[in-house]
Image (cartoon, helix red, strand yellow):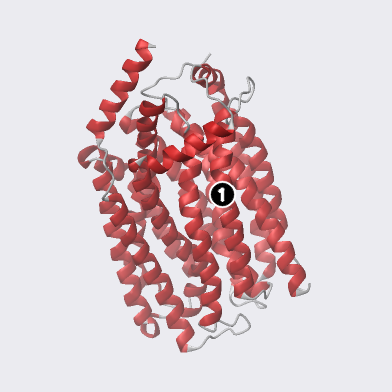
Amino acid sequence: MTKLNENRIPIQDKINYGMGNLSVGIAMQVVGTYLVFFSTVILGIPGVLVGLALGISVFWDAITDPLMGFISDVTKSKRFGRRHLYLLIGSVGIALTLLVMWVIPPSLSTNLKFTLLFIDIILFKSFITVYVTPYTALGAELSSDYHERTSIQSIKTIFFLLGLAFVSVAGLYLFFQPSDAYTHGQLNPDSYRNIGIISAILVLTAAGICYQSTKKYIDVLNRKHIKDRQANNLTTFIQSLKSTIQNKAFRSVALCYMFTNLASAFLSNMGLHVFTYTFVLTSQQIAIILAVQFSVSIVSQPIWMLITRRVDKKPAIIVGLIFSICAGLIFVLLVLLKDRIASQLIYFFPYAILAGFGTGALFTIPLSIVVDTIDMDELQRGQRFEGFYFGSLTLYYKLSQAIAIFFIGILLDLIRFDSSLLHQSEFTLISLGLILAFGSILSFGFAYLSIRLYPLDKDKVLEIQSDIAKIHHIA
């Protein structure tokens, strides 16, 4: 029987667990990167309707996350534990809805296309919730060591970024090749079907590896949480919701994470529009820019681990935000000089490098901090609700994303973006770029203001853990 070490877990176990995040990265990025473009340009659905569908789906995703986290926390299964059954159900559902999403015929009526898209995206978001919330909570249970938590999240982030890179880099480069019929490969409807099929296969494969490799911990985690005697009633749910709101440390990092993900929402949902129309880049050129950004984020993970050990987690996040804001300012300059740099790849490398390094911290460190804030809640309540806390974390940022996506759809119409035109008006081209740039800069700025209020550091977390240990020893 596998023994769960409260301080250290083997590197192979971290890698096996992190593989599950490859599924998350692929699934979320293939939708985030391509669906708005596919829906408005290929299917011809008005931007306001696309924004409405995606906004409602993200809102639904957000409000179901805490509920799914609570369900996972109170699940009692000798065979599947609290988390693993949901890994199976979620991954299969994600794969199936990904297959359906990209085969909606453009020849259908607008109302029918919108209805099919709306139903499928709601189902997709539901299965994402079923998979991601228990999966993330599982990672929070694997170690109680302050820096080991960052290590687990760092490796998990690497796989997430690999998933993003596959979709945004390899996907654009391999699946969206230009042809005689489509000089811009991103205008070929068949490309979306093909990347949907491959993405579904990879989601199932990576999730299966994670499930098979981490199920050895089920017995140990079951024994640990039997002692908690968690009640699965409405009162406990309400108490958990109240605790996340009152937990100042959690509230601070959750707002920070919300705003950094809001910046990601702008890039994911408008990036392809901006690079295609404002900067006149081919799918291969876009793929290279994104490859640089993701490569820097991945390579930066060991660096950020060292930085957190040297200066602690909160200052490291602030440094990451500063790099990200600088990248946004460079992007503003690129938009203003768009006519001089159009189709010229080299000018985008400084932006990609700075953005990649800065966001490398923002993908990893906040998730490590959330686990520390759960220690504070355990000291006060005597129980741990990892699933509920991470579900509440996603509630914060997904609600903001739902609003942002809805307004992005409206903005596309307001700036007179016309999917039937290969060349947009000068006003539209400038507006696309500036909305993306300033939306990101403002988001990172608000994230900085939020994380400044975070009250914990390593010494305080170790003191909390010591108090928890004393209570358990007395009990």
Q: Amino acid at mark 1?
A: Ile
Residue in view at x 47 percent, y 16 percent: 3
Residue 55 in the image, given as x and y percentages of width and height: 57, 62
Mark 1 sits on what residue?
A: 63
Where the C terminus falls, by quadrant? top left
Residue 446 in the image, given as x and y percentages of width and height: 33, 60
Residue in view at x 68 percent, y 69 percent: 189
Report the front residue among 339 and 43.
43
Q: Relative to 4, does residue 83 appear above or below in the rendering?
A: below
Residue in view at x 55 percent, y 67 percent: 406
Counting other residues with Cα less than 10 Å from the Cα at mark 1, is it few (<14), some (14-19), or many (20 or more)? some
Report the front residue among 78 and 246.
246
Residue 429 in the image, given as x and y percentages of width and height: 46, 82
Report the front residue among 240 and 399.
240
Work out whether residue 202 can be spotted: no
Toward which corner of the image does residue 49 lie, by quadrant?
Answer: bottom right
Mark 1 residue element:
helix
Q: Relative to 349, does residue 301 appear above or below in the rendering?
A: above
* Horizontal side, residue 460 vs residue 10: left or right: left
* Horizontal side, residue 267 vs residue 337: left or right: right
